[in-house]
Structures are given as structure tokens and as C-alpha cells.
Image (spheres, rainbow, N blue to C red):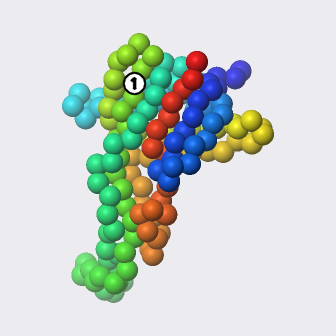
Amino acid sequence: DDQSRPGELVMSDGKKIKGKIATTTDKPIRIWVEAEKQYEDVPLDQVASAEVKVLWERDEKEWNFKESGSDVKVYSGKTYPARQVQYKFTLTDGTVIEGDVVAPLYVTTDDGKTKTYVLYKRDKGEVGQKLTDRVYVKSVTFTK
């Protein structure tokens, strides 16, 4: 049962990935709408597009406990990249829903290869990485 749809992902580094896009079989995209304090479940076939809105991104300081069992923290002198985003979904009927989401997108390109991309609400990198190293899905557009 193929529930995929043709579309394009645009990544934060500008790379475009075209192919058939699907999510977990029989699972809707679950969006936390803060203003309503509830989840909206949207079937993938009702999504026309999704765009990211970066709420914040920065280098976070790495803190460690001074000793095992201690509640005293010390700065390690190192940082890691962190980012929080929301997605704005435009549905096929024109409805717009904005909120937090964590959902996998499986993209199968023309060469038959499938790769997983995840719409993250919060992303945290490894110590020493830069924000630009943490590439994320900037937009998703489905084609007819």
C-alpha cells in the first residue's frame, strides 16, 4: 500500500531532494498547537506544504558535574549547536496549522534509494560542531 506522494524537500543548506515522500504507514503528522494546547493529527495526503520557522539557534555551553554525585556544575570550555523550530503546514484546503512536530519523512528518489529525514522540534549537535553542520528540513512541497 503506497501512501507516498511526489514532492520536494529543501534543506537548510540549499540542497533540494525530489522524490516520493511518505511518513510512517497509517500515521498522521501530529502537530502540537500551543495556542490551543492540543494536538492536531493531519494525514499526509492533506498536506500541501510545510515551512520551517526557526524560533532560536545558538551555541550552547557544555556543562558537567564537578564530581560524581555533586550538584555543582562547571563549564567545560566547549560548546554544541542547538536549535528550536516550528513548522507551518498549509493543507490542501488552504487551512494553516503552526506548531511543534517530530515526524519522519521517507523520500524515495528516482534511483530507487530511500532516505529518512526528520522534522524535529529541537535539534542538538555534538560538542565542537557548528550550527551550519546541523542541516535541517527547511520546507516540504507536494506536487500534484
Q: Please count the marks in the image.
A: 1
| Left or right: 128 in relation to 77 | right
| Secondary-structure class at tag 1 | strand
* Above or below, 57 relative to 116: below
Which residue is at a point 28% across and 49% down the rendered structure image? 55
Which residue reaches farthest bottom?
A: 67
Which residue was labeled with disc 1? 90
Apparent side of residue 13 relative to residue 75 in the rendered image (left or right): right
Q: Is residue 70 visible?
A: no
Query: In this view, which residue lies farthest toward the top?
Result: 93
Q: Residue at x 29, y 82 (%)?
A: 75
Query: In the rendering, at what x and y percent does residue 12 appear?
Result: 47, 50
Q: Nearer the viewer, residue 56 or 72?
A: 56
| Residue 63 in view, yes or no | yes
**What amino acid is labelled 1 in the image?**
Thr
* Observer-nearest of 31 and 4: 4
Question: What residue do we see at 32% from left, 32% from top?
Answer: 98
Q: Residue furthest left?
A: 35
User: Outermost residue, front direction?
Assistant: 14
**Quarter placement of the N terminus:** top right
- Measured as percent of width and height from the top left, residue 141 is found at 51, 30
